[in-house]
Amino acid sequence: MVDRHSDPENGSRAKRQKMDAGDPKDNPYLAHMYEDANSNSAGSSSSLGKLKRHQTTAALARQVEDGDVNPFSGQRFSSKYFSILKGRRDLPVHAQRDEFLRLYQQSQILVFVGETGSGKTTQIPQFVLFDDLPQTQRKMIACTQPRRVAAMSVAQRVAEEMDVKLGDEVGYSIRFEDKTSPKTILKYMTDGMLLREAMNDHNLSRYSTIMLDEAHERTMATDVLMGLLKEVVQRRPDLKIIIMSATLDAEKFQRYFNDAPLLSVPGRTYPVTIYYTPEPEQDYVEAAIRTVLQIHATEDEGDVLLFLTGEEEIEDAARKISMEADEMIREADAGPITVYPLYGSLPPHMQQRIFEPAPPARRPGGRPGRKVIISTNIAETSLTIDGIVYVVDPGFSKQKIYNPRIRVESLLVSPISKASAKQRAGRAGRTRSGKCFRLYTEEAYEKELIASTYPEILRSNLSSTVLELKKLGVNDLVHFDLMDPPAPETLMRALEELNYLACLDDDGELTALGRLASDFPLDPALAVMLISSPEFYCSNEILSITALLSVPQVFVRPAAQRKRADEMKDLFAHEHGDHLTLLNVYHAFKGPEAQRNPKQWCHDHFLSLRSLQSADNVRMQLLRIMEREELEMISTPFDDKKYYENIRRALCAGFFMQVAKKDAKGKSVYTTIKDNQSVLLHPSTVLAHDAEWVLYNEFVLTTKNYIRTVVAIKPEWLLDIAPTYYDLNSFAKGDIRSSLMRAAERLARKEKMRADKHY
DNA sequence: GAGCACTGC
């Protein structure tokens, strides 16, 4: 690692903030002098009275904000309100309040670029509130976030700033929790939640202004919402839209929204010096470890953040760095180091540890200690850690990619984008000026990194999205104006899958089943399985399995205790497969023994309490929808010999396209139906390796092709449940076809015998 | 004989 030059892109921001020097009313410190001039010092309803909708100026808003009485709640402002208000007025966005209001008033759509620390997420919605006055229209202002925690914490903060109780005038709405009331006029919500609302209210008529925050993240929901809003604004001239984004891409948003005006506000961060390597690194993990140790040996006090790609890589690097650092302490009197791994599947209390202070010097006057955090991308967007001074960026992350040809999503370690690299570097400049060590050459940065990561919509299976769009009333998918249209093949695959699931008819129109399926927050195959389950007398059980398949892995397998964990899993194993094993786990979890102390029970049985609780939550949500749609909740008696068979049949009703047959020769090698992929059973399966036909939940592409979470089924069931997909004429001659033919003959024979009995 | 980056309804 050799340093080179400093990169101006994260250096000091030279943008000038405009000062409104002319009108003394614009000076917040003089505002109180004018407050009484409008003869309105008390009375809640009247203090907003001086504001006319879409004619508010910064000065007018300030007068109301500086009053004694909260104009929205009618209560007297607390003293805390005024101290917070003072801080808010120092935020960069405040200097441009008038400029913002003018643009907001003049145009229906506005693109707002505010960098980190500008205050956009908390302040802009309040600026809008004072001008849009949604309560006079019996409407609300919505501000979307890609993540739940953000929606919750920002709403909490803004409620404090506005001196109201969270859930009254300011609230939030996320899956499993609606913290709003009839009083609510400003609602923070996840983008997915707004999309759900749009499915039942195509014009989003409850809102007078909709703001999409963090639009640069380009989540699936944000992309679909943007396409939708582009249509809604045509039908609703009264609706205003603000697209809020960080960093570049602003022009792209502007162009997409018919050259909407743009407002940029500078952020408030410290300069970060960028260093590149002179030569490409062969082994980025090794280079990263070396760099961290070198920082520790030579750089001033300050914590280090290293980005790696996944759990194993991180744990491995953490071990090595700790070992090497111990040696440095012994041999070179280096300061102490604490290394914290950080990734999503880490239990919350372990994630919290990253906020502990760096270790102190080992003796008075000794070399200071240092904290090293080794993290996945979670520290790039979801979590911010103050006090980071050094960032080490090897330039890779795991990214989801989708292969429409074999209908498989997989994770691949890939080079990051320039936007990600900037975001990572920025993590070093939150509390003071910092340094970022990029473990690639400057030339590679310039020439090899793409400008920004491909949006999720280009990297995913679209069957859920296509179903959602149909439900949203978008009939012509090909001409639906998405910012980045997906590959036609991906779209075709989704339409085909939905057609086989009978969610779309042959003309591509939504069927009754499709409409019902879109009510469930589930992948279409899961939704169809659940809706069909009453026909198989096992909707209670399929509901549990569906919930378990929608949450992270419930089985925990710590590296040090694999054997013990596997033994515990065997306690729940069902000979016919993993779905049934999951059901056994759930039933045990809900049983009296486990419920006495769920935490202990899960720990003892190597199960994830978090996953099981979240499955329970999902199950309750799905149950409410089942009841609302009058789908019968029913079970086959447990002592009936068809109890498990009925469940396995019901699984086929949704997953008949995810089936594999064991090869005639070659042990435990399977071939998937129609796609003809050669696959292996994932080693985690409980299924003995002798099932001829299996249904799988997931295709995992790693060093080998694995199918994971599998259950044994019979080909007769497939012919019975999905006759169109299993039309024998559509199969090429071969092992699969002949096996299906024999199954068809067995079925016909049974039918005949049954018919004979009747005569 | 194992690879779940991260979100979301």
Image (spheres, grey):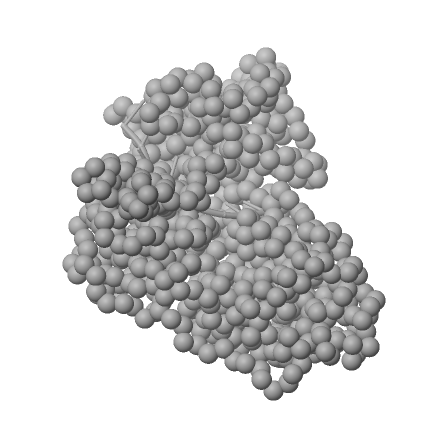
Q: Position of residue A340 (x, y in %)?
A: 36, 41
Q: Position of residue A285 (x, y in %)?
A: 24, 45
Q: Image quarter for residue A353? A: top left
Indicate the quadrant containing the N terminus of chain A: top left, top right, bottom left or bottom right.
bottom left
Say left or right for A41 vs A284.
right
- Judge whether residue A429 can be spotted in this image: yes
- Tell which residue pokes out farthest to the top in this image: A639
Q: In the image shown, does A509 or A163 lie closer to the viewer?
A: A163
Q: Position of residue A56 (x, y in %)?
A: 69, 76
Q: Residue at x 81, y 65 (%)?
A: A44
Say left or right for A438 vs A546.
left
Residue A370 to residue A232: above or below: above
Q: Residue at x 36, y 35 (%)?
A: A672
Q: Position of residue A598 (x, y in %)?
A: 55, 23
Q: In the image shown, does A374 or A207 lie closer to the viewer?
A: A374
Q: Image quarter for residue A346? A: top left
Say left or right for A509 vs A710.
right
Q: Residue at x 25, y 51 (%)?
A: A295
